[in-house]
Image: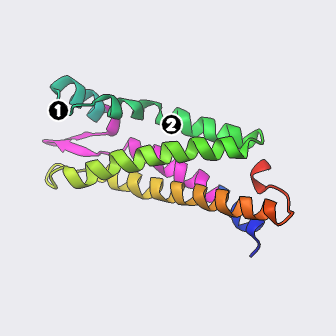
Amino acid sequence: MSAARVARVAVPVQLAAAGVVVAATFLPWAHSGRRPIDVYEGGALADRLDLISAPWMLRLAVALPLVLAVSAVLRWVGRGGAAAAVALVAGWYVVAIAAVATWRLDPSVRGGGALVALTGATFLVGAVVVELVFGRQAVRAGGRDPRRG
């Protein structure tokens, strides 16, 4: 498979992984009694109860669907490099908060949303890296830049 084709195949994987990440933010990341808490409520709760020293990190999750939508729009208008950069930053952010939530929360209160988000974000970051590496190889080989649409 050519480098350009590999880079083009990575794009649908990125879009699907971004969809999984956005959907996972609405899944329960923790439970308080019988009440599920998604990442948005978790950020507000951590801020209100002063549970973490940097609650702004969880507050950024509110913008996550918008940031990933911006990445998709950038790709649609032919700005693949910018779309990949935005998706990469968003993916690493989700990997960080989901990894902390997955490994630091007590299993008795942990929900599945963080693990789903971690999985989706890992695929997102991996697909972006594959696109960037193989896209660059395709351009060096004299081919068309697959990130340009």
Which residue occupies the foreground of this view, 136 or 27? 136
Q: Give me the residue at 74% from left, 41% from top.
A: 79
Q: Is residue 23 visible?
A: no
Residue 82 % position (x, y): 67, 41
Kindly indicate the quadrant of the structure image that contains residue 115: bottom left
Residue 23 lies left or right of residue 46; in this view the side is right
Q: Is residue 138 visible?
A: yes
- Compared with 127, 50 (above or below) is above
Q: Which residue is mark 1?
A: 51
Q: What's the mark number on residue 76?
A: none
Residue 96 % position (x, y): 36, 48
Which of labels 2 and 1 is toward the front?
A: 1
What distance separates the C-alpha of mark 2 from that of mark 1? 24 Å
- Highlighted range, magenta: 12-40
Q: Secondary structure at mark 2?
A: helix
> Which quadrant, please, contains the N terminus?
bottom right
Q: Which residue is mark 2?
A: 65
Query: Which residue extends farthest front?
Result: 140
Kindly indicate the quadrant of the structure image that contains residue 137: bottom right
Q: Secondary structure at mark 1?
A: loop
**Dot 1, crowdedness within 10 Å: few (<14), some or many (≥20)?**
few
Instruction: Identify the amino acid type marked 2.
Output: Pro
Residue 29 lies left or right of residue 106; in this view the side is right
- Compared with 141, 27 (above or below) is above
Q: Please, which colouring scheme is shown?
A: rainbow
Whether 13 is among the magenta residues is: yes
Instruction: Identify the amino acid type marked 1.
Output: Leu
